[in-house]
Image (spheres, helix red, strand yellow):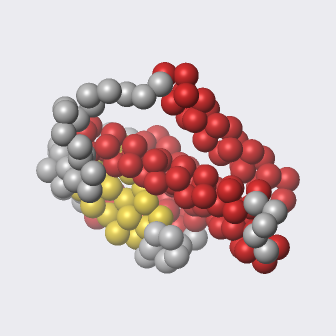
Amino acid sequence: MNKKQAGIILGLLALIVLAGVAAMKINGPVQDIAGNEWNIGKPTANLENAGGDDYFNNARLDKEKKDSEILQTLSNIVNNENVSKDKRDEAAKKQSALALKNEYEGRIEISLKGKGFEDVLCLIQDDNRAVNVIVKSKEQLDEKQRQQIQETVVGTCKIKSVEVENRQ
């Protein structure tokens, strides 16, 4: 991937973040989502017991929220002239790495859905040493399916440590 492609990816990610911020400003504050109690420090979604579509949708939303927060923090560092050049360069590298990680996760998910899996969630660890693939399937995955997932991950992001989990 060359610098031009990395710039395009970063630009697109910035547009996504800006669209989210604009939507929040236009729609205003959301009232009474979790009742009248403050839920500070309390989990709002229980992913462990969520079933089916809820698990995958909640996990995707949580992942996207976390990534956009990290991306915004890194963007603030890169754009802050008061921060040293070394720190800004480091933040820019982390931005590129996050964009590449998200691209790989998306490619893997789309590829596996194209191979017949109902729903897939791919999570590449921050250190790029392992990949967790969570597959929606009513039945246990057989060895051929697990091998297919392994080959897709290795072919896409060259990470050989793949953990496959089955969810219903």
Quarter residue 85 falls in: bottom right
Q: Nearer the viewer, residue 151 or 3?
A: 3
Quarter residue 97 falls in: bottom right
Q: Residue furthest top?
A: 27
Q: Is residue 100 above or below residue 127?
A: above
Q: Locate residue 49, reporting x and y percent.
A: 14, 50
Left or right: 97, with 165 as reference point: right
State the residue at coordinates (46%, 41%): 114
Q: Nearer the viewer, residue 154 or 52?
A: 52
Left or right: 67, with 137 as reference point: right
Q: Quadrant of the N terminus?
A: bottom right
Q: Residue furthest left?
A: 49
Q: Is residue 26 above or below residue 1?
A: above
Residue 1 in view, yes or no: no
Q: Locate residue 2, reporting x and y percent.
A: 83, 60
State the residue at coordinates (34%, 48%): 59
Left or right: 49, with 5 as reference point: left
Q: Locate residue 141, reporting x and y percent.
A: 24, 57
State the residue at coordinates (32%, 55%): 134
Q: Locate residue 60, reporting x and y percent.
A: 39, 46
State the residue at coordinates (68%, 56%): 76
